[in-house]
Image (spheres, rainbow, N blue to C red):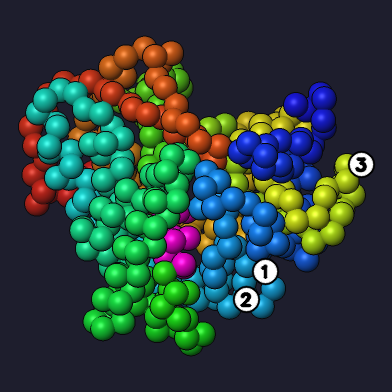
Amino acid sequence: MRSRYGSLVPVELAPGVPATLVIGYRTALDILNDPSRFPADPRNWQKDIPADCPVLPMMQYRPNALRTSGFEHERYRAANSAALAEIDLYRLSDTIERVATPLINTFSTTGNCEIITQYAKPLVFATVNELVGCSPDIGRRVSEGAAAMFDGIDAAEGNRIFTEALAELTAQKREAPGSDVTSWLIGHSVELSDEEIVNQLVTIYVAAVEPGQNLIVNTLLLMLTDDRFAAGILGGSLATRDALDEVLFDDSPMANFCMSYPRQPILVDNTWLPPHQPVVISLAACNTDPAIRGAAVTQNRSHLAFGAGPHACPARQVAEIIARDAIDQLLDALPEITLAIAEDELRWRPGGFHRALTALPVNFPPSPPINAARPLSTP
């Protein structure tokens, strides 16, 4: 793609849905930091997109910080940033340990488990549910809807389930607010409507859950298959933080995202971009752009995995803490964990947005349950 097209590649996101894929790091930064020429509002684009288009639920307009521009975006961004800033990061680590311990205890004595379904997915969902004040029942429906949207399989129905569950959560918190992100959004001075609250929560779940579990799984895969990290699990040569940095460059949990929609034709890198057609940042391609990959990526955080510019993820620190602590809790309890199958037998899920395994089966020496009253040490 680079040799044929340079930094901008014509693609189809679905049959008959053209877009431009940005694969150059510096070009992506220019676009992400230029919201006046590259607004994130998709309303003009989606007028001609059929309702059953599999990518529409992931890209359609929503009254939230991710899919708006100008004053509208500033209003939503202010509420989101303020609510997320209320999260106690020290208590967050305690929450992750409290969620991780019983999950690990369900399989520690068996000598094997499947990381995604038995650990990463339920851990991230339970943690995010607690942060937003969501009950397990509503959380289950949110999980079901989000998975369908990411995979692009029955995405419209997934979108319906997703938003209905979050509307129920919003109504509950209007009536009985608590110390959680949903209540803080409701109480913000911009006075968001119920529909707006639901759509801020959509952004939080979309940005946190699927990418969060994928970040945990992809990082564990690296640590279990790369000798620099595999030796470090027991020997301490490289830390989980180092593995996270490398995965965020080379195996980003969101492969392609950060869509914008130019209002008029724009010349970029000697290529004319058509108006009202998606410009999609390939985070995976930009992070591996040979033009910027002269230096090591360990302890290098210049990747675009969390976006950049005014639409950059405001919860980057929260996401990194969840992934790091989830991995550390698992490896502290089961330090001799290994892949249960050959690496080339692993399979990746469909979908043009995420980088996600279908399963990550592992083996380990059976271990007694963790004493929940005893704090886990950090490797």
- Please report whichever mark, 3 or 2, sits nearer to the chain's N-terminal start: 2
Whether pointer 2 and pointer 1 mark residues with C-beta atoms closer than 8 Å, the reply is yes
Given residues 252 and 146, the one toward you in this image is: 146
| Secondary structure character of the magenta stretch overall | helix
Q: Position of residue 12 (x, y in %)?
A: 67, 37
Residue 69: numbered disc: 1
- For the N terminus, the quadrant is top right
Which kind of residue does numbered mark 2 sit on?
Glu
Give the SS element for disc 1: loop
- Quick check: can you spot residue 194? yes
Which kind of residue does numbered mark 3 sit on?
Asn
For image coordinates 76% across by 35% down, the residue present is: 9
> Which region is colored magenta?
199-208
Whether pointer 3 and pointer 2 mark residues with C-beta atoms closer than 8 Å, the reply is no
Q: Position of residue 349 (x, y in %)?
A: 44, 30
Residue 72: numbered disc: 2
Distance from disc 3 to disc 2, alpha carbons, whole Å, reads 32 Å
User: Neighbour class for label 3 at 10 Å: few (<14), some, many (≥20)?
Assistant: few
User: Neighbour class for label 2 at 10 Å: few (<14), some, many (≥20)?
Assistant: few
Distance from disc 2 to disc 1, alpha carbons, whole Å, reads 6 Å
- Quick check: can you spot residue 22? no
In the figure, residue 10 lies in which quadrant? top right
- Please report whichever mark, 1 or 3, sits nearer to the chain's N-terminal start: 1
Give the SS element for disc 2: helix
